[in-house]
Image (cartoon, grey):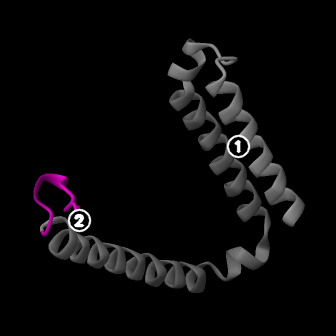
């Protein structure tokens, strides 16, 4: 497992390095969003195939769906609360993004 994560990290660093050094053509960078979206669709399709082939997942879809709903709701609530607290106590204390200078 750690080797696959290391592989992903190496790919990420290599892509960043190649684009930073200008080895990637500007037109490819402009089309990066479309390319990412295309491969995301392929990934979601393959995930759907694997879920459809696994009988255990199909049998447990209701309990998995309920747990996913609870997890998503808590994530949204806590994220929203963190944004609210941050905007109320941190951002409003420094108008227009200005930072107080101690010197």
Q: Is residue 23 above or below residue 3?
A: above
Res 62 → quadrant: bottom right
Name the one closer to the observer, 92 or 75. 92
Give the number of the mark in front: 1 or 2.
2
Magenta region includes residue 95: yes
Please name whichever residue, 23 or 51, is drawn nearer the observer in this view of the structure.
Answer: 23
- Does the segment drawn in magenta span residue 68? no
**In the picture, residue 39 is in which quadrant?**
top right
What residue span does the magenta drawing correspond to?
93-103
> Label 2: which residue?
102
Front residue of 95/55: it is 95
Where is the N terminus found, in terms of image quarters?
bottom right
Crowd tier of the residue under label 2, counting other residues whose Cα lies within 10 Å: few below 14, some 14–19, many 20 or above: few
Taking the spot 35% from the left edge, 80% from the top edge, the residue there is 78
Q: Main secondary structure of the magenta part?
A: loop
Mark 1 or mark 2, earlier in chain: 1
Q: Is residue 27 left or right of residue 3?
A: left
Q: Secondary structure at mark 2?
A: loop
The percent position of residue 90, horizontal first and vertical second, equals 21, 71
Residue drawn at the location 69% of the way across and 32% of the way down: 17
Q: Nearer the viewer, residue 88 or 76?
A: 88
Location of residue 70 in the rendering, given as x and y in whole percent from the top left corner: 45, 84
In the picture, which quadrant includes the C terminus? bottom left
Name the residue beneath numbered marker 1.
12
Up-down relation of residue 79 to residue 97 (above or below): below
Please give the name of the residue rendered at 79% of the width and 63% of the height, measured from the top-left corner: 53
68 sits to left or right of 52 = left
Vertical comparison of 40 with 61: above or below: above
């Amino acid at each position: 497992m750690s080797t696959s994560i290391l592989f992903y990290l190496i790919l990420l660093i290599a892509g960043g390095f190649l684009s930073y050094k200008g080895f990637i053509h500007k037109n490819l960078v402009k089309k990066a969003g479309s390319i990412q979206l295309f491969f995301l669709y392929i990934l979601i399709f393959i995930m759907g195939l694997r879920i459809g082939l696994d009988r255990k997942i199909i049998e447990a879809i209701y309990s998995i769906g309920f747990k996913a709903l609870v997890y998503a709701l808590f994530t949204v609530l806590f994220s929203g609360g963190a944004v609210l607290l941050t905007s109320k106590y941190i951002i409003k204390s420094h108008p227009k993004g200005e930072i107080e200078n101690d010197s």
